Image: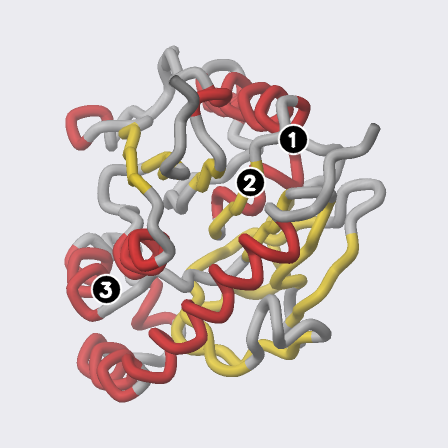
Amino acid sequence: MARVTSKVLFLLNEHIATEALLGDAFAERGFDIDTFEVVSAARAHSPAGEVTFPDPTRYDVIVPLGATWAVYDQTLLDTWVSTEMQMMRDAADAGVALLGVCFGGQLLAQAFGGTVARAPRPEIGWCEVASDRPDLVPGGPWFQWHHDRWTLPPGATEIARTAHASQAFVLGRTLALQFHPEVDTDLLKIWLATDDHGDVDRAGLTHDEMLTRTEQLADDVASRIRVLVRGFLTQVAGRSLPS
């Protein structure tokens, strides 16, 4: 019997980078949700290693999520990052729609021929994003926590940016995001508790400031996430496959 309910797979590239609000938004659209933990908590301090990923053709949408590592780290490229990039290419070839978030967006850029490198400055906290396609990626403050940035893959169209980095591009049935639409206060508390490198302090912020701002923006972000997921499903995932 043919599958009726749409299915989305969230790839948890790091165990603390979960789907959070994005999972809620896909569930509201009637999706069955699967998750796959790429690097477990036990391997967090030594993330290189071989990974056997699920069959991408079992899903309508795959969402590679964030991580604290660099997608160009050679020890990771020699193991699971290259495997995950091939999974993304195989998924795209099979007509599976892709939505990448931060590390996941960078992985998509790298998988399809773009590059990723250290940015001149990190973006941490709530940053104003300018969008050419507010019906797909609404502009406004989105949460950021990244040190790297991408160059666009061949054929991709950038649709959002900040002064310091590209923030979103579309390539076929793929949408890559540099920011974190999934963040809520519960997820942010986990990230703040694991900020071993002092990123927040160096950004001139405090934990309390970031949490307060996240609480203040909660309703607005929830509304914009619904627009983003609806736009992705109708305008990106809903695009006709090339003949």
1 and 2 marks in contact (CB < 8 Å): no
Give the mark nearer the N terminus: 1 vs 2.
Answer: 2
Give the mark nearer the N terminus: 3 vs 2.
Answer: 2
Residue 125 percent coordinates (x, y): 39, 73
3 and 2 marks in contact (CB < 8 Å): no
Mark 3–mark 2 Cα distance, whole angstroms, equals: 24 Å
Residue 229 percent coordinates (x, y): 47, 60
Figure check: 32 above or below 148 = above
User: Pointer 1: residues within 10 angstroms few (<14), some, or many (20+)?
Assistant: many
Q: Quadrant of the C terminus?
A: top right
> Callout 2, which amino acid?
Leu
Q: Is residue 105 left or right of residue 76?
A: right
Residue 231 percent coordinates (x, y): 57, 63
Residue 35 percent coordinates (x, y): 28, 34
Secondary element at tag 2: strand
Q: Is residue 137 left or right of residue 59?
A: right
**Which residue in the structure is indicated by mark 2?**
98
Mark 1–mark 2 Cα distance, whole angstroms, equals: 12 Å
Residue at image position (60%, 67%) is: 136
Q: Residue furthest bottom?
A: 216
**Which residue in the structure is indicated by mark 3?**
188
- Looking at the rendered image, the disc whose residue lies closer to the viewer, 3 or 2, is 2
> Callout 3, which amino acid?
Leu
The numbered mark at residue 156 is none
User: Pointer 3: residues within 10 angstroms few (<14), some, or many (20+)?
Assistant: some
